Image: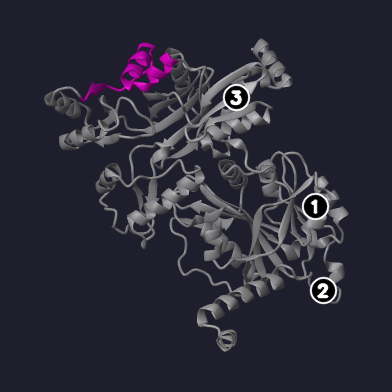
Amino acid sequence: MGKDKDTSRTHPNPRERQTSDAYAHRLKRMRERGLKPPIAPHGDETDQMKSEYALDCGWGRLVFAQTFETAQPLIAALRGEQPDQRDIAIYVRNPHVLLANAPQELFLDPSHTYRLDLSRYRPSRRGPTGYFIRRLTSQADAEAINRIYAARSMVPVPPEFFWSQRDARAITYFVAEDNETGEVIGTVTGVDHGHAFGDPENGSSLWCLAVDPAARHPGIGETLVRRLAEYFATRGAAFLDLSVLHDNDQAIALYEKLGFERVAFFSVKRKNPINETLFTGPEPDEALNPYARIITHEARRRGIHVEVVDAEGGFFRLTHGGRSILCRESLSELTTAVAMSICDDKTVTRRIVSAAGVRVPEQLSADASPDEIAEFVARAGRVVVKPARGEQGRGISVGLSANDDVDAAIKAARTVSDVVLLEEYIEGEDLRLIVINFRVVAAAVRRPPVIVGDGTRTVRELIERQSRRRSAATGGESRIPLDAETERTLAEAGYGLDDTPPAETSIAVRKTANLHTGGTIHDVTDIVNPTLVNAAIKAARAIDIPVTGIDLMVKSPQSADYAFIEANERPGLANHEPQPTAERFVDLLFPLSVPQAVRQSVRQSGERG
């Protein structure tokens, strides 16, 4: 027995040897790349590397910890953080020592550091399709980057800062531009450590990778990362580092696919309101969906108590002083049962708003005779079939002209509601206006999901990739269903799910613009026509509902032409960031939570008006 035991030690089986070798390799890599001391300077490099260096990035500063000899100066640097910004101390080699010196002020960032060895990086053989990557070149680019930052809940940067850094050697901005629309649809920032502080390791780092959640093209994030890696590789950088939250599985999968490997470097941040969720642990409202969470976060910011009643259903109670209000996302006790029942039945909604002078499309009940339905379809040309009750676009079929298709759509809609409507199809764009306390707070055009062919992937694969992006951008709330409506829309464009469309071919995959079925939203608050604003307010007053999403079909948000589609008693406020929808909602519920200076300013402006 002893002999067998000794033999097994001397001659391990291949599986054990492989596991042992892999473990030893990981330890070796961690020691070499994560825990090694700073590279000793050669010659006059001591004078070249700046000491106690922090780089202003607009959203905050990168504080390079390897340029600080002791903890106290580093702590002092982090104390210099400006309001509404977030500084990051990176490459902290002894974070336990740093935190022990300022435990009430600092915290260990729950992010992993990944490194790409640029000497081993290999570019992709496939270039971008439908968009291209370029440097930041204009003030409009800077504003577009901030728009993407806002959509991704990132700290904005003063546009003039971007512009002032366009020729800087330490900071580099790349953007992805759509070939067809000219819109900026993605961005990434790179930092050259050598130019920044004379880094003897000749490193570089990646920051603020962000893709417009409404972008149509696949692979934008990957292409931006590759472009930055290739940019620094041609300039002789040794590696490209990045920091990513430990639970951002989608991003981590992308980085590992590109050859990034995790290294044991740490980042430390200062405790501030922006970073609060990173150092306080999960809040009781973290289980809520994004539409409820945007409200509870704003309430907690004002000191309003939040009690989660049912996270799965989006129910929560807000309490401030002697006032307590139960909400389900943006639906609160202030919305009466009568107003809710009006919104719930689209036939009633149409009658109520029409009587108030709001334009509505022609409509017919699906209970009408076959001859009446056929005559209605022939007169309208194309129709929309939809359940009289329901939400999130379920059971809706759009743009039907064949009687057989209409009959099939009616049967599908009856699985959602017993009462089904046929409605005149109105050409145009789907405009959602958020009305709170009878004022329009936000306006956005909602567009159906579109995929763009790359010449290699099937329609099914392109839809799945787009669906994953929409889901990630909306906290799992938006996905493109592979159902009969999607297949019908594709068939009209001449495609099936298993076809491979040519590169740069745009294909609409649904006709409805509901966000829950993959639609995208584009803010137009600053340009919406006053006639459309007045129509939305008139409809809200007719229903007598304090918070609603009014849907209009319009030729353009800047045109006065419209047709009322429906009113939503529980609009998704999170879809309209950076417009202050959550702020105005909490103002409505708790007027006394508005700061006194703001109330005084509003009162004075009202008196002047």
* Residue 585 horizontal/vertical position (percent): 57, 24
- 339 to the left or right of 426: right
Q: Does the rendering let one see residue 239? A: yes
Amino acid marked by disc 3: Leu
* Residue 584 horizontal/vertical position (percent): 59, 24
Gap between marks 1 and 3, in whole Å?
Answer: 35 Å
In which quarter of the view is residue 151 placed? top right
Examine the residues drawn in magenta and state their main secondary structure.
Answer: helix
In which quarter of the view is residue 564 placed? top left
Q: Nearer the viewer, mark 2 or mark 3?
A: 3
- 580 to the left or right of 157: left
Q: Dot 1: within a 10 Å radius of its alpha carbon, few (fewer than 14), some, or many (20 or more) residues? A: some
* The label number, if any, that marks residue 99 in the structure image: 1
Q: Which residues are magenta?
A: 337-366
Amino acid marked by disc 2: Ala
- Whether 361 is among the magenta residues is yes
On the image, numbered disc 2 is attached to which residue?
Answer: 40
Gap between marks 2 and 3, in whole Å?
Answer: 57 Å
Q: Does the rendering let one see residue 425? A: no
Gap between marks 1 and 2, in whole Å?
Answer: 26 Å
What SS does tag 1 mark?
Answer: helix
